[in-house]
Amino acid sequence: MQSELPSTTAAKLRLRWQQEIALVHEERLPGWEAFFADDPKIKTWMEDLRVRTENSIRDEDAVRFEKELASTIKAWHRINELVAETYRKENPDPELWELRYVRWMKIVFIRFESSMGEFYVVPRTPTRPPRAKHWYTVDEMMFFLRPEMASLLALSGKLPGRPEDLAPPGPGENVLHIDATGPTVRSYYEMYKSKRPRYG
């Protein structure tokens, strides 16, 4: 039995709001409550955004809803940045930083040495990547550190390459695409076909 999709604009907007806020809540860093407790302006600011979003849903105003949703997501990201900067000041040794905090820090990169070679970790996908062969976002590093991926990397004995550094696949090759740059890891297969023109 399939669940019914929301039929009204308000119901669709509310469902989208719930889905987006659930993703934002998954990203919240421990310690965000302290910012609410210590600074009443932050709590008032977030409550104001919530009320404005609720009003846009009630009014079925999709354009205003998109604006308020974007503002709310940006506000939560800003809170994560504040929490991460506090964490960085309280923990001066980068080797002990948890990756979930690094994702929100105002740093350019962290350089690591490993038995497989040198690599760099950047908080999020940069506009200008480091001039290095091996660099990864925090989300990619968290993906590589999963037990099954760590085992595969240990077996290969090499650092993973970036997709843009790989040769294009040949005709008929089935390629697995994995995107670990966002809050959730997405993957899909794609069959590459021959680019040669067919005659006859």
Image: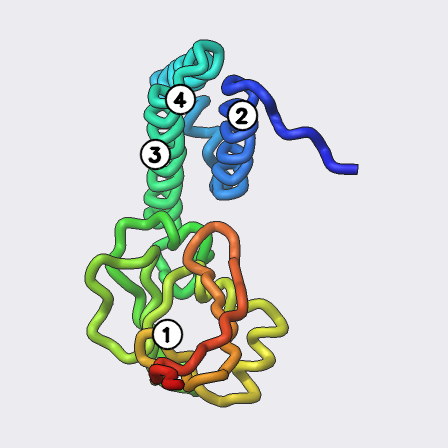
What numbered label is drawn on residue 62?
4
Is residue 47 visible to the viewer in this orientation of the structure? no
Residue hosting label 2: 12
Is residue 145 visible to the viewer in this orientation of the structure? yes
Dots 1 and 2: beta carbons under 8 Å?
Answer: no
SS of the residue under disc 4: helix
Q: Position of residue 119 (x, y in %)?
A: 34, 76
SS of the residue under disc 2: helix
Asked whether 135 or 84 is in front, the reply is 135
Q: Earlier in the sequence, mark 3 or mark 4?
A: 4
Residue hosting label 1: 163
Q: Earlier in the sequence, mark 2 or mark 4?
A: 2
Q: Position of residue 20 (x, y in %)?
A: 49, 35
Q: In the rendered image, which quarter contains the C terminus?
A: bottom left
Q: Give, as a three-letter code, the residue at label 3.
A: Lys
What numbered label is drawn on residue 74?
3
91 over 156 or under it: above or below: above
Dots 3 and 2: beta carbons under 8 Å?
Answer: no
Q: Earlier in the sequence, mark 1 or mark 3?
A: 3
Q: Give, as a three-letter code, the residue at label 2.
A: Lys
> Which quarter of the picture shows residue 6?
top right
Q: Give, as a three-letter code, the residue at label 1.
A: Pro
Closer to viewer: mark 1 or mark 3: 1
**Residue at the spot 63% in from the left edge and 29% down from the top edge:** 5
Q: Position of residue 72 (x, y in %)?
A: 39, 28
Q: Earlier in the sequence, mark 1 or mark 2?
A: 2
**Residue at the spot 38% in from the left edge and 54% down from the top edge:** 102
**Residue at the spot 42% in from the left edge and 18% down from the top edge:** 53
SS of the residue under disc 3: helix
Give the CA distance from mark 1 to mark 2.
36 Å
Q: Earlier in the sequence, mark 3 or mark 2?
A: 2
Asked whether 17 or 27 is in front, the reply is 17
